[in-house]
Amino acid sequence: MIIETMLKGQKNLDVLNTVIGQLSDGIWENSRVMEKYWKNLKIETSCNGEILIITKPFSPFESRSQVREFFAKKLKAIVKKEKEWSNPDIQWNRNCNIKLSYFHGETSVSDVYEVYELLNNMSKYSY
């Protein structure tokens, strides 16, 4: 299954790749429950630059919206774990510009929050 994210750019690519990285080698590294997810997901960029989430045929996902929701929930969980384990100053909101160390690249909380909202189709803001 191919999930169109309507996201473009290296920063958004870094944000989504972080989810797979944290599932396989980070926060959920030794979790057998998460293994079925990261082994059946990959992130690619289409010829027009849109970031796509690709699921393999035997993935545990039943719909595109389920994949988008899964990624959004994991993004929020990663930020909350970094707050809990490393930086109590982190706030989960669109205005927090604290750089995150659990994410690839130069990623701030506001960058992650933007992707979270767009994946959930809940943004009333223009990004």
Image (cartoon, rainbow, N blue to C red):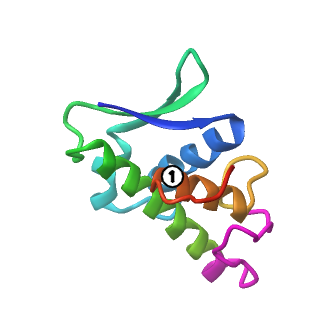
Q: Position of residue 36 (x, y in %)?
A: 28, 48
Q: Is residue 39 magenta?
A: no
Q: Is residue 26 left or right of residue 65?
A: right
From this viewpoint, which residue is outermost toward the top?
A: 47
Task: Provide the secondary structure element on which disc 1 rests.
Answer: helix
Does 78 sit above or below residue 63?
A: below
The residue drawn where x is 34% and y is 41% is 39
| Residue tagged 1 | 19
The residue drawn where x is 70% and y is 77% is 86
Q: Position of residue 126 (x, y in %)?
A: 67, 51
Can see residue 101? no
Image quarter of residue 93: bottom right
Determine crowd level at label 1: few under 14, some 14-19, many 20+ residues with C-alpha closer than 10 A.
many
Range drawn in magenta: 83-101
The residue drawn where x is 38% and y is 56% is 69
Q: Is residue 120 left or right of residue 59?
A: right
Position of the N terminus by quadrant: top left
